[in-house]
Each structure stands twice: as C-alpha cells, then as structure tokens.
C-alpha cells in the first residue's frame, strides 16, 4: 500500500477562504454585477499571494509560532547552523547561562560538522528540520524537490539517533503543498514570533534592542548561529546575545526550553526513525494532543489496557494499528517476540459512531485516514496471528477496541 492511500488533504483556512469567496461572488453577481462579484475573488487571490511570506499567518497550514501569553517565559531558537566559528560560542554562552534552546540546522552544514551536532545534543538542546540545503526560495520549487530536501534532513538526523518533529521552512516561507509534505514526514511547522531582522547575521548592530522591543511572555525568539564575518564580528554577536539574555530577565521573564513554551516536542530521542507511513499517523496523534476526540480518550483507553503486572506482555501503544492494512500480520510480528504464554494488548480505532466522527475529524484536520475496526475483525486477525484466549472490549468513550490475546506454546 502506498503512502498516498493514507494521506488526505486537510481542510485549511485557504480552503475555507476559497469557499467563502466563491459563495460571496455567486451572491453578488446577480444583484451587483460582475465587477462587485470579482472583489471577493480578488481578495482571495491577494491572500494566497501574501500568505507564504507572513511567518505567523496560518493560511495554508497550521503554524506554531508562540506559546501561551499567560506564562512568564520565552524561548530561544537558532537558525542556519551549525557554524564552526559561531555555534560553539553560542553553546558555551547557553551553558554558562543555564539555557536550553532549539537549533534548526542546515543539513548540508550538519553533514560537514557532525562534531558540532553531537555537541548540541550532548548539551541537552533540540534539533529541528531546516531542510538539507537551506534554499531561501525552496517553496517556489516543485513538491518533489521540497519532499527530497525535508526527507534528506530526516535521514541525516537518524544517523545521530534523533528524529526531528518540528520543521522551519527557509526564510519562514510556506506554500500550499507544504502541509501534505509535513504530514508525510511526521513534522509540524514551527516559525517564530520575535526576530531581529538580522539578515542572517549580516546586520547585528542593535540586534538586542530590536529583539527586546515589545517582547512578550510566550514569544519564540529566532536568532542565527552563523558567521557574521570573522572573529571580531563574532565577538560582537556574542555581546548582543548576552544583552538579549540579560534583557529578557530584566523584563521579569525567564528563558525556558521551547518544548516547555510550546507544549510539544521539537524532536524525538526515544524512538527509532519511523517509516513515512508510521510517521504520518504519529504526526496526527501528536498534533491532536490539545483538541481532538482521540486525545481526550486515548490516555484512558491506554491506561486501562496497560493495567496489571504481567512481565511478559507487549502493549502496542503506537499509531500502527490506525494505519496498518494487514492487522493479522502486524500482530504476528509482535507475537514473534513473545515467550509462550506472553500477552499482547493493543487498541485500534473502533467502528462506532464516535469512532467514525473522530476519523472524519482526523481527515479534515490532519489529513490522516484512520482504519476503523470491529470487534469481530480484531478477533479474526488475532486468531490468524496465532493468539488464544482472545478478548476485545470497547474502551471508554467508544473510540477504541481494546484487544488482549495470549501466545500459545508454539510461540
């Protein structure tokens, strides 16, 4: 099964604006004439042209760019590194100040300086995807080129044992194709709410003043850790960074890791790199953490499944079951790792009214087509996988079917 069978086009603000503009034109045409009817269509085209260049305008896709205003913290992110002259200085400064940040790296630079990448990770910072070659005009290129740039960076980071979850497009430019591509790679778009217009460290004079002006709690600050033009300028850049850190604290704000400000992870250290199919579902379930029906019921369902103290038990807590076509083959792969008498516990989206509603919401909001299963289908799959003593119950909320089966003596 190809990835395209799993990936639908989510409904974005652009879709809604398009529908509204066409409806307005249809209403205006008979009563006001073609000139007035063209006005909403022209406005829609203007929005389409401007949206890619506005870092916080989530027109084509959801964009994370700040945290909650109600807190008392901001966070730091650095773009375009690693740079052999500047990034180690930034890391030393952050270590002295006790600050953790996120680095959106250029894959090409990371390939040239793997020791700096390892240094970033060793000091507790996170890494986001900033494409492989960092072409500022990448979003004007065909989708296959963008896909290759994103995927090549993910493959590179897998060599360091991490999987980025956040993506920042070069120059913060987006396009209508980007959301589908990010879903395919298990990423979300993260831009920023404060920047110093430093032109990639070619304009560092007054950088701290521009950053600190109108700084608010929850701001995501974007800086650059690339060479400003030699050791003298690098020293001046560090002075500006030091002023920024001091100014943040003087304003009564603290500097928190981006994960804490945003309430979501920037990268995953704990899991092996996922296939694109797995990453797509992973993106959907992670992104739904604050709003979807799945998020509200998933913890309860999973907690119920994990109750007990069986040492020889596998609890399948990945999104695989929501995507996998061959349910029996998936259970069979897990069963192969069980000793005789070991148990498998798992859940799958339930074919119930609430499950159907949640699956429809997942398509519209996240572009993921989830596979719903009945109790009978799960039992048949478990039997085919060689499990016995099979039981399937509907979890609280009616969204999941929860299965338990035991491996036979021949396992």
Image: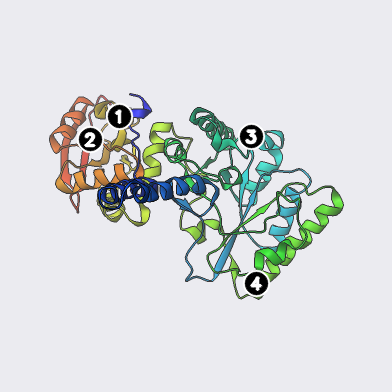
Q: Are marks 2 and 3 in contact (CB under 8 Å)?
A: no
Q: Are marks 4 and 2 in contact (CB under 8 Å)?
A: no
For the residue pair 407 and 209, the one nearer the viewer reads as 209
State how far apart marks 3 and 4 are (Cα).
35 Å
State how far apart marks 1 and 4 are (Cα).
52 Å
State how far apart marks 1 and 2 are (Cα).
15 Å
The residue tagged 3 is 133
Q: Secondary structure at mark 3?
A: loop
Do we see residue 172 in this rendering? yes
Residue at 44% from the left image edge and 34% from the top image edge? 274
The N terminus - image quarter: top left
Coordinates of residue 264 in the picture (x, y in percent): 46, 54
User: Which of the two discs, 3 and 4, labels the residue nearer the N terminus?
Assistant: 3
Q: Is residue 66 left or right of residue 81?
A: left
The residue tagged 1 is 330
Q: Secondary structure at mark 2?
A: strand
Quarter residue 244 falls in: bottom right
Compared to 329, does 76 lie above or below? below
The residue tagged 2 is 406
User: Which of the two discs, 1 and 4, labels the residue nearer the N terminus?
Assistant: 4
The residue tagged 4 is 249
Q: Is residue 311 left or right of residue 128?
A: left
Q: Nearer the viewer, mark 1 or mark 4?
A: 4
| Label 1 neighbour load within 10 Å: few <14, some 14-19, many 20+ | some
Q: Nearer the viewer, mark 1 or mark 3?
A: 3
């Amino acid at each position: 099964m190809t990835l395209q069978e799993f990936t639908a086009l989510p409904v974005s603000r652009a879709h809604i604006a398009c529908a509204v503009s066409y409806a307005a034109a249809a209403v205006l045409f008979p009563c006001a004439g073609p000139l007035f009817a063209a006005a909403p269509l022209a406005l829609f085209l203007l929005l389409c042209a401007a949206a890619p260049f506005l870092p916080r305008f989530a027109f084509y896709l959801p964009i994370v760019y700040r945290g909650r205003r109600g807190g008392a913290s901001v966070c730091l992110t650095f773009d375009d590194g690693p740079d052999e002259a500047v990034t180690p200085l930034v890391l030393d400064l952050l270590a002295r100040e006790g600050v953790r940040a996120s680095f959106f790296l250029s894959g090409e630079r990371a390939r040239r300086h793997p020791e700096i990448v390892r240094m970033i990770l060793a000091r507790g910072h996170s890494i986001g995807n900033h494409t492989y070659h960092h072409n500022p005009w990448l979003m004007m290129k065909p989708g296959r080129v963008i896909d290759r740039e994103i995927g090549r960076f993910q493959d590179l980071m897998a060599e360091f044992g991490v999987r980025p979850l956040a993506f920042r497009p070069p120059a913060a430019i987006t396009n209508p194709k980007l959301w589908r591509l990010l879903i395919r790679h298990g990423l979300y778009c993260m831009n920023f709410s404060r920047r110093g217009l430093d032109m990639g460290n070619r304009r560092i004079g007054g950088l701290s003043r521009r950053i600190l002006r109108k700084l608010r709690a929850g701001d995501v600050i974007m800086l650059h850790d690339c060479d400003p033009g030699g050791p003298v300028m690098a020293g001046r850049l560090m002075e500006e960074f030091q002023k920024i850190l001091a100014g943040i604290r003087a304003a009564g704000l603290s500097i928190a890791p981006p994960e804490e400000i945003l309430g979501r992870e920037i990268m995953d250290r704990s899991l092996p790199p996922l296939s694109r199919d797995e990453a797509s579902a992973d993106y959907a379930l992670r992104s739904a953490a604050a709003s979807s029906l799945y998020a509200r019921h998933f913890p309860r369902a999973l907690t119920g499944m994990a109750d007990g103290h069986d040492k020889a038990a596998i609890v399948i807590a990945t999104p695989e079951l929501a995507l996998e076509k061959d349910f029996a083959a998936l259970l069979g792969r897990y069963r192969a790792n069980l000793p005789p008498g070991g148990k498998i516990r798992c859940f799958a989206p339930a074919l119930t009214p609430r499950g159907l509603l949640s699956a429809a919401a997942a398509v519209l909001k996240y572009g993921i087509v989830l596979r719903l299963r009945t109790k009978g289908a799960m039992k048949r799959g478990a039997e085919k996988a060689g499990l016995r003593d099979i039981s399937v119950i509907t979890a609280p909320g009616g969204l999941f079917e929860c299965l338990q089966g035991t491996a036979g003596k021949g396992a």
